[in-house]
Structures are given as structure tokens and as C-alpha cells.
Amino acid sequence: MEDVMYFAIESHQFATFGHLLDQMYNLRHRVFCEQLKWVSAEGGKERDIYDNLSPVYLLHTDENAEFLYAAARLMPTSGRTLLTDVFAETMPDAVAFQSPFVWEITRLCVDEELIRQHQPKRRMLDVLRMMLLAGMEFGYRNGVDTFLSNFDEARLRIWRRAGARIDIIGQCDDFSVPVMLGLTESGRDALEAVRERLGHHDRVLSRAPRLHSSITRVAA
């Protein structure tokens, strides 16, 4: 199973893609609760108050949008966001990042086990790079100037080696490893820099697909 997609969904599409959101909450629990121990949640799903604020979800799935391989949450900082709350004490001026042109990216997670099953030749590094490209394409298409996001040192190295232009502006030491807060340049020039570095000039982000009726029934 090698044919895959990257697409974004908004709140009016959540019901249609409920099966993928369920998988995402399960994956987030495994990654952020069980593995990283950054947060705690009950019922095998990790969901927080920011999921109630009409975010955009960036999803990586198979060609039929049946299985979720990776996900991230995107939100404009014109409203309340996770990072401005968590990093408030270390940010130089949290108010400065409240803008419809500055978007937050959080809860990036990858289902490594499922990818090994369905895409045995795929490297996790390549999945992360394509998620970066998909996010950059979303930013360019939607007028985002800057992304506000958090990284550990390993993820930061991956992004910078992929050509992302990142400035670190804060750090939180309340997690299992130091977590840094960074501003990533968005826009056409930033996107082209990543494409050039990765040697990948084709579009990654596609429109949300129309689901087969069988998948819709399962989601319902």
C-alpha cells in the first residue's frame, strides 16, 4: 500500500472524516500520553480544549482516506492557542503573535507502526519532510506569514536540514526533554526553499477527498 495523500480539513468537514479524527485522537494518546508523557488523558484518546476552537487538521492518509498515518493541528493565533498558553512565561511578547497571519502548529504525530505495515519502504524521515511541505503549502495558499510551533532538538534539526527557516524564541523545561518554541517563515519563498532543499517540486497537499459510501457508513 504505497499510494498516499496529504490534505487539510476544517470544522465543517469533521463529521465526514470522523473516522480519521478518532484515529488521530488515539494516535495522539499513544504519542503524547504514553510515549512522551507530556499530557494525561483518559479513555485512550488525547483531546484538549483547543480541539473545540475550530482548528484545521493536516492529515496524511492512504489513497482512500481510510487509514491515518500522521496528523497535525493548525490554528490562527488571533484566538487562544496552546503554545501561547504553555510558553507564556518564556515568550518575549505573547500579544505580538496574535495575528490571523501567524498560525500555530501543534500535536504533530506519526503512526510509525502503521506506516511500517502499509509502507514498508517508507522512511519516517520522509514522512516528516512531506508533512513539513504540506504545511508550508497550506501556509502559502492561505496567506500565512509565519508558523508558531514547538520542537525538541531532534525535530528541529530535521526541519532545518529540510530548509525551513526557524527562529527559536522560547523554551519550556517542564517536559521529558527540553521543548523549544520557534517561528517558521511561511510564504512562497520559504516554500520554494524547502522544495529546493528536498528536491521535491510537485505539490504535496491535495483537496480533501470524497469518501466512498462504505467509509462514510463506518464513520457514522
Image (spheres, rainbow, N blue to C red):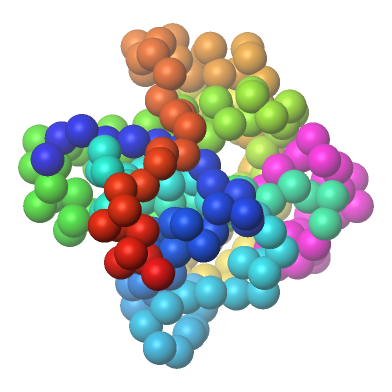
Instruction: Tell whether position 53 is magenta.
Output: no
Query: Relative to residue 128, is residue 118 drawn left or right?
Result: left
Along the line of sight, the residue nearer the viewer: 25 or 106 = 25
- Does residue 197 appear in this view? no
Query: Residue 181 versus residue 117: which sits nearer the camera?
Result: 117
> Looking at the picture, does residue 174 appear above or below residue 206?
below
| Among the 4 quarters of the image, the one containing residue 112 | bottom left
Question: Along the line of sight, which residue is nearer the eye, 133 or 62?
Answer: 62
Numbered label tally: 0
Q: In the image, what residue occupies the spot 19% across and 49% down?
A: 115
Asked if residue 87 is among those painted magenta in the image, a careful observer would answer yes
Percent x, y of residue 85: 75, 66
Q: Where residue 138 sits in the image (x, y, percent)?
A: 58, 31
- In the rendered image of this protein, does residue 3 appear above or below residue 189? below
Q: Image point 15% across, 35% down: which residue? A: 2
Extreme residue in the bottom direction: 42
Quadrant (top left, top right, bottom left, bottom right) of the C terminus: bottom left
Question: x and y percent of residue 81 in the render?
Answer: 73, 60
- Magenta stretch in the rendered image: 80-104
If the image is split into quadrants, where does the N terminus sit?
Answer: top left
What residue occupies the far front of the structure in this picture?
213
Q: State the residue at coordinates (41%, 39%).
A: 209
* Residue at the spot 20% in from the left edge and 33% down from the top edge: 3
Asked whether, in this view, residue 3 is left or right of residue 79, the answer is left
Q: Is residue 51 visible?
A: yes
**Residue 126 vertical position relative to residue 190 in the rendered view, above or below:** below
Image location of residue 10, percent across then percent down:
61, 49
Horizontal side of 103 relative to 44 (left or right) equals right
Image height check: is 121 above or below 72?
above
